Amino acid sequence: MRRLFFQHLFVQHLFVVVTVLTCAAAPAFAREKALPKSKPAAAPPTAPAQLSPAAAASATERKHGPVVPMEEFAAESDPSTTSRVADSKPEEPSACYTRIADRIAVIQSLAELAGPGDCGATDVVKLEAVIMPDKSRVTLTPPATLRCTMAEVVATWVREDLTASVAALGSAIRNLDNYASYDCRGRNRIAGAKISEHGMANAIDVRGIHLANGKFAGFTDRNFAFDFRETVRKQTCARFTTVLGPGSDGHHETHIHVDLAERRGGYRLCQWNVLAAVDEVPLPRPRPQEAP
């Protein structure tokens, strides 16, 4: 009985000793586990293998695509720009442009005129000169901005009508004095008035023509040949649908206005009074000093 008692007591004592040793070793074990593993020493760098230029280019092509020389890259167009150019087809010349360009007139095609308001026109050209039947040229100073159809009628007017009238004077035309062509404004420059044909590039104002003999034939110059001005009036009114000059509305005393306005029933308007020269009235003789 005593032996069993001492065996039991020994077991208990041994259990206590083991427990104490385990608790004492636990923190050290935990600290050892938490510490990171030491990093192995880095290996000394080795020099990269030298590749031949062909092998390097091949490796770069496999990784990034084909190598493009800088000068070739600089010469390439912007892809987006190229796409836009390819998508936008240039407008073909109009039938009017094809009919008169470099045949009866020197013209340049202009962009469409748009606004403000009701102003605007399509198939617009800059009329720089009229090509005469003998291939000589009558310049417009300054060049006129007009619809192509209006430019065609102006060129025909100069070639066929004015040339014949000037020939009767024993001279030839060198220049057409353009006073006004395209201008987005109301009639007679009155605010709020109906848009003028000038605002639709369908009109031109002309003061006269410069002749080869150095003279200026003013269409409204009362001191220039009356018969010439009357002939020009008749030709002009037959060519254009609107002609305004002296006596029309007070705004065309020093130049004439012509346009191709379309009206109901084909109505035409010709208001131009060709005025005769005014004889100079002699001034009275000076009053003598001795007169009472």
Image: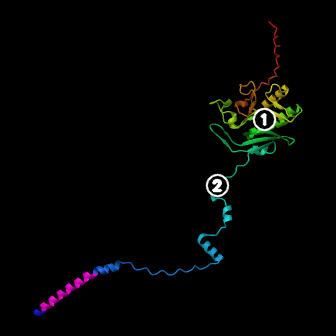
Name the quadrant of the N terminus.
Answer: bottom left
Please provide percent x and percent y for residue 49: 59, 80
Q: Judge left or right: residue 132 versus residue 247.
A: right
Verify whether residue 11 appears in magenta. Answer: yes
| Residue furthest to the top | 292
- What kind of secondary structure does the magenta stretch mostly adopt? helix
| Residue furthest to the front | 290
Residue at which label 2 appears: 84
Please provide percent x and percent y for residue 75: 68, 61
State the image quarter where residue 183 is shown.
top right
| Pointers 2 and 1 in contact (C-beta within 8 Å) | no
State the image quarter where residue 200 is shown.
top right
Q: Secondary structure at mark 1?
A: strand
Q: Nearer the viewer, mark 2 or mark 1?
A: 1
**Which residue is nearer to you in this view: 179 or 120?**
179
Q: Which residues are magenta?
A: 4-25
Please provide percent x and percent y for residue 172: 86, 35
Residue at which label 1 appears: 177
Which numbered dot is residue 6? none
The first of marks 2 and 1 along the sequence is 2
Q: Judge left or right: residue 82 versus residue 175.
A: left
Q: Looking at the image, is 39 positioned above or below residue 154?
A: below
- Look at label 1 and name its amino acid: Asp
Q: Secondary structure at mark 2?
A: helix
Using the numbered discs, state the Cα–Cα distance from disc 2 to disc 1 in whole angstroms: 42 Å
Residue at the spot x=80%, y=27% of the render?
Answer: 221
**Which residue is nearer to you in this view: 9 or 244?**
9
Q: Residues within 10 Å of mark 2 (few under 14, many from 20)?
A: few
Q: Residues within 10 Å of mark 1 (few under 14, many from 20)?
A: many
- Look at label 2 and name its amino acid: Arg
Residue at the spot x=15%, y=91% of the render?
Answer: 7
